[in-house]
Image (spheres, rainbow, N blue to C red):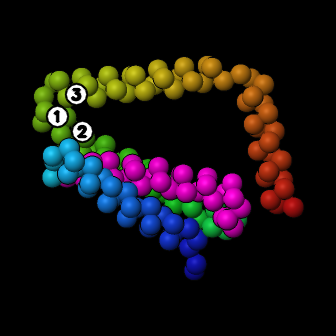
Amino acid sequence: MIIYGTALLALCHLLGIFLGDLLGQLMGVKTNVGGVGIAMLLLICARLYMQRRSWLPQMTERGVEYWGAMYIPVVVAMAAQQDVVAALRGGPAAVLAAIGSVVVCGAVISLINRMESPAAIAAAEAESILIKEHRHA
């Protein structure tokens, strides 16, 4: 079975890990700082760049979407487990900081959703339906 988009994912992952290690060294810590997050951002940027220039065949685009969908939950679960253990060992300040960051993120997402106009949402949904119909035709 051919899995499309794997090379792009691998390249972004390796570059993200390298940049995360470099960032860790610049910060004076002996660990990778945000390498996996950097890799995901690189994957998103590479996919958008290639789509705009029509360099991304449809099968490869689907493969990149698949790997992006698989990659994010696994990484978030791994990071969440590590963060919870570290927070519990770090004491109440770390736990309060974690709870505060979740509340702030939720508030920002809610604010962004409220800023979206209903007309823009309807237009985006209509465009999405047209794109799906065009792909299946």
Q: Is residue 18 left or right of residue 7?
A: left
Give the residue type at disc 2: Val
Q: Quadrant of the C terminus?
A: bottom right
**What's the amino acid at mark 3?**
Val
In the rendered image, the quadrant that contains the N terminus is bottom right
SS for callout 3? helix
Are circles 1 and 3 on residues that touch, CB within 8 Å? yes
In percent of the image, x 55 and y 57: which residue is there?
A: 46
Q: Residue furthest bottom?
A: 1
Looking at marks 1 and 3 on the same chain, the residue that comes earlier in the sequence is marked by: 1
Residue lying furthest right:
137
- Between the C-alphas of marks 2 and 1, the distance is 6 Å
Q: Where are the magenta residues, as a range?
A: 31-57
Relative vertical location of residue 1 with respect to residue 6 in this rendering, above or below:
below
Q: Amino acid at mark 1?
A: Leu
The kind of secondary structure element at disc 2 is: helix
Placement of 85 over or under 60, stated as above or below = above
Residue indicated by mark 2: 84
Tag 3 near tag 2, CB within 8 Å: no
Q: Does residue 10 appear to the left or right of 131 in the view shown? A: left
Seen in the image, is 50 located left or right of residue 10?
right
> Is label 2 in contact with label 1 (beta carbons under 8 Å)?
yes
* Labelled disc at residue 88: 1
Between marks 1 and 3, how big is the CA–CA gap? 7 Å
Residue with the most extreme front position: 26
Q: Residue at x 53, y 22 (%)?
A: 110
Q: Is residue 34 above or below residue 6?
A: above
Is 4 drawn above or below residue 108 in the view shown?
below
Q: Which label number is shown at residue 95? A: 3
Q: Specify the quadrant of the image occupied by residue 98.
A: top left
Query: Residue 127, percent across and down?
Result: 80, 42
Taking the spot 59% from the left edge, 65% from the top edge, the residue there is: 63
